[in-house]
Image (cartoon, helix red, strand yellow):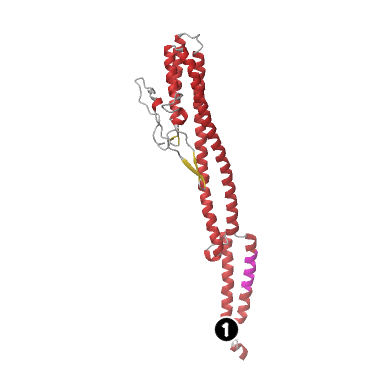
């Protein structure tokens, strides 16, 4: 077959374009730091890349949910600890008043502190985190223990024992198909209106007994206080168990993030050392092609007629 100058020129241009395209692809990977810049670069790899990105995005949201869950549980535990301190102080005052050695004036003084403790307990029951009332279930935008103001500016908490808080549960998604109820309702922690050990009923009973000087009733309330204290501690233990579980899930999600990021890096990220060497080789090949091409194109039939 006769090889013409036109064939040589066409083949030269084809080879130069191929070398330039390879060199451009390598330069693009070096500039972006990624070996997949469009689906055609690696059709199989792009499917894995998109899958890893979706899983990382979900994992990131789970981590945010876990952080919010830990904040809620920690705040709940803090508030419950404050309520426990109030109950502990109430028991101390009840024991002190029930000794039978206190005059009525002393009992009246103790009663004043008991009323202040009750007001403090109501304040604790209305605790908020990020604008949400933690003891009112799903209706966290409404104050659970909302009472009218008395003439002296204080709140009239006489009917605190009759309050019914919302029983709904707030569930946080902390993992794939894992929902965790994180809230405790006011009736669960402080007692229902029908419970004999309702904490507000206990306060009302003790306050009335102090007013009447009824020492027997004060002694009877000690067992009731202990009953409610045991239930409060059981709820705090449940919150603590959930906190421990969420801490473990937080560590698991962090490990999963590292693993997914590593897999994504293996699929997407470019090897700079390899690409640098490859780029230099391609540059030399391209320059050699140009040098050889200059000799081919310069030759024509006239050159042989001289």
Q: Pick whichever, 200 or 26, lies toward us.
A: 200
**Relative image position of residue 93 (x, y in whole percent):** 50, 17
Q: In the picture, residue 294 is in which quadrant?
A: bottom right
Q: Is residue 258 left or right of residue 104?
A: right
Vertical comparison of 218 with 167: above or below: above
Vertical comparison of 46 with 1: above or below: above
Q: Is residue 267 magenta?
A: no
**Relative image position of residue 302 (x, y in whole percent):** 59, 89
**Where is mark 1, residue-wise?**
7
Dominant secondary structure of the residues highlighted in magenta in the image: helix
Residue lying furthest left in this view?
A: 151
The region drawn magenta spans 277-287
Q: In the picture, residue 282 is in which quadrant?
A: bottom right
Q: Pick whichever, 280 or 69, lies toward us.
A: 69
Vertical comparison of 15 with 240: above or below: below
Q: Is residue 278 shown to the viewer in this render?
A: yes
Q: Is residue 249 left or right of residue 153?
A: right
Q: In the picture, residue 157 is in which quadrant?
A: top left
Q: Residue at x 53, y 28 (%)?
A: 233
Vertical comparison of 168 with 145: above or below: below
Q: Residue at x 53, y 30 (%)?
A: 234
Q: Residue at x 44, y 21 (%)?
A: 203
**Relative image position of residue 218 (x, y in whole percent):** 47, 15
- The quadrant in which the N terminus is found is bottom right
**Relative image position of residue 134 (x, y in whole percent):** 45, 34
- The quadrant in which the C terminus is found is bottom right
Q: How many marks on residues?
A: 1
Q: Pick whichever, 36 or 166, lies toward us.
A: 166
Q: Residues within 10 Å of mark 1 (few under 14, many from 20)?
A: few
């Amino acid at each position: 077959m006769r090889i013409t100058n036109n064939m040589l020129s066409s083949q030269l241009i084809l080879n130069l374009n191929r070398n330039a395209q390879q060199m451009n692809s390598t330069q693009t990977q070096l500039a972006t730091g990624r070996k997949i810049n469009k689906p055609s670069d690696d059709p199989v790899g792009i499917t894995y890349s998109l899958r890893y990105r979706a899983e990382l995005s979900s994992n990131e949201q789970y981590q945010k949910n876990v952080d919010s869950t830990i904040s809620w549980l920690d705040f709940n535990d803090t508030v419950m600890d404050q309520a426990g301190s109030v109950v502990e102080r109430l028991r101390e005052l009840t024991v002190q008043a029930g000794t039978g050695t206190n005059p009525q004036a002393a009992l009246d003084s103790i009663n004043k502190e008991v009323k202040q403790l009750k007001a403090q307990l109501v304040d604790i029951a209305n605790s908020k985190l990020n604008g949400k009332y933690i003891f009112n279930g799903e209706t966290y935008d409404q104050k659970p223990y909302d009472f009218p103001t008395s003439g002296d500016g204080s709140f009239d908490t006489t009917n605190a024992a009759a309050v019914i808080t919302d029983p709904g549960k707030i569930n946080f998604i902390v993992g794939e198909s894992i929902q965790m109820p994180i809230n405790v309702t006011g009736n669960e922690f402080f007692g229902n209106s029908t419970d004999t050990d309702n904490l507000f009923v206990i306060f009302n009973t003790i306050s009335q007994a102090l007013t009447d000087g009824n020492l027997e009733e004060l002694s009877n309330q000690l067992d009731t206080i202990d009953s409610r204290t045991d239930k409060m501690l059981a709820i705090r233990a449940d919150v603590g168990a959930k906190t421990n579980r969420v801490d473990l899930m937080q560590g698991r999600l962090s490990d999963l993030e590292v693993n997914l990021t590593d897999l994504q890096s293996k699929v997407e990220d470019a090897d700079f050392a390899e690409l640098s060497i490859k780029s230099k080789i391609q540059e030399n090949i391209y320059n050699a092609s140009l040098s050889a091409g200059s000799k081919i194109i310069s030759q024509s039939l006239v050159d042989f007629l001289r």
